[in-house]
Amino acid sequence: MDQSGVLSPGWTIGGLDRSDARPLSQQMQARIRDAIVKGVLVPGERLPSSRALASQLGVARGTVESVYSQLVGEGFLVRWGAAGTRVNPQLQAVDLGHLQREKVPAEQASQRATGSGLAEGVRPLSIGVPALDIFPRKLWSRLMAREARHLASGDMAYPDERGALELREQLASYLAVARGILCRPDQILITAGFLGAMGLMLRSLLQPGDPVWIEDPGYFRVGQALDLVGAKPVPVPVDEDGLCVEAAIDRCPEARMAIITPANQAPLGASLSLARRLELLDWSRQTGAWIIEDDYDSEFRYAGKPLAALKSLDRDERVFYVGTFSKVLFPRLRLGYLVVPEPWVERLRWTARLTAPASGLVEQRSVATFMAEGHFGRHIRRMRQAYAHRRSALIEALQRHTAEELNVQVPEGGMQIVGWLKSPIDESALGACLREQDLGAESLRRWVRGNPRSQALLLGFVTVPVEETEAVAQRLAVALKRARAVS
Ligand SMILES: Cc1ncc(COP(=O)(O)O)c(C=O)c1O
């Protein structure tokens, strides 16, 4: 707004919605607050006089006056007599980001609905999200409805914090057959995904300052969660045999815990060799450290059977095993499970009871039925087939369109491939060009903590149906070319 009180071209409060159930004054307050929070109205800027704004909006002057008064009371505005009503200049020094009601975290800001049939927040080449287009949604809603209908009043009391027994029983059988893990349903806790399980373990097992081995590159949330509880992440390099156990022992033999992805190292895709598995178990036996096995997507292997879990070799009750339904069903379900070694069951159960008891009975029972009736196995087989096709299609299309820019590395399993850049490109230019092409490919950079790596893109192939692959690879080539041109 300029000094005469006319709305500046950058901001207008116009278009109050008279069909909106909220009173006009509330809508106006929200608009002005929002404009300040988003930086459209800057500290010190003058607002129109109440008379001018009232006539512009066709509302009573008193309405504008009361809106201004309210915002003065909240500290967003100040009244300066003849100098008019202004945005509080003291807001200059304050970060208002957290007040943005619709604020999207930076990492999601680039993830928008695509209009191409993909779920909101998922774009072609996005990583970490399964192919939601082949999820059996009708079947799932039928199961959910059935479970909701069958809720007895006894089901509505306080539950067992470990989660629904039906689901824990299904999981115990599934883990024995599919992952070689022998455990009782009593040892299983249903959690809010892998991260929910992490929360329980970090709270139960670690003290502030405890060193913890993490893979580098590795799942960035793990390092962030350790930072949050004041533990000390120790980044350990990975190679084609997975975590370099020898390097880890050299670097920090006294670590209290190792958090790893043995089946399919996230994000580079190695599986931990048997020699390393034994070395790791040996170290934990000798030092009393814990191993957290993050088995997030081992169901997807395109040659041979899924490898047995590290937990299946654990004779000393040192390995906590975590599985998730985020990749085999869908992430917003927020369901995962933790297999706790016998000596620690009570401790973990207590933490769960006090801080994160399992929730969502209907969802848990629906998953149990999904498993019991054989849909789970069928869905995994179907995904595996579809993913194998999507993977081959993308590899071929990348060869046609991006061979000049990328060396493609194809892991034997998982949901993504790695495109190593043949020569560096400015990261932020690359990010911007990928967004411009509406692609969800992600830079390896965020997954790297301490040990430098060449530049690479993580390319989620499962989010690209075969018929869209060609166009997606072309868009990727355009993004790379444009980013290079401005680098
Ligand atoms: C390495 C790794 N572990 C686990 C998960 C899943 O976590 P959650 O079960 O919390 O969705 C992901 C998801 O991207 C992952 O990349």
Image (cartoon, helix red, strand yellow):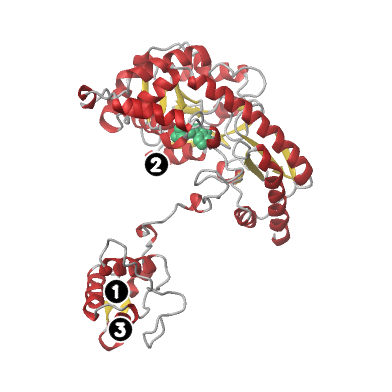
> In the image, which is nearer the foreground, mark 1 or mark 2?
1
Which of the two discs, 3 and 2, labels the residue nearer the N terminus?
Answer: 3
Rounded to the nearest whole Å, what is the CA distance between mark 1 and mark 3? 13 Å
Which kind of residue does numbered mark 2 sit on? Leu
* 36 vs 47: above or below: above
Q: Real-space Cα distance between discs 1 and 2?
A: 35 Å
- In percent of width and height, residue 188 lies at 37, 19
- Tell me the quarter of the image containing the C terminus: bottom right
- Residue visible at 27% across and 69% down in the picture: 24
Q: Position of residue 154 (x, y in %)?
A: 20, 22
Nearer mark to the viewer, of 3 and 2: 3
Q: Amino acid at mark 1?
A: Leu
First along the sequence among labels 1 and 2: 1
Q: Of label 1 and label 3, which has the lower sequence position?
A: 3
Label placed on residue 77: 1
Identify the residue at horizontal 32%, vertical 22% (top origin): 164
Tell me the tag on residue 49: 3
Q: Is residue 290 visible?
A: no
Place of residue 138 in the rendered image (x, y in percent of width and height, measured from the top left): 45, 31
- Does any portion of residue 385 appear in the rendered image? yes
Q: Which mark is residue 228?
A: 2
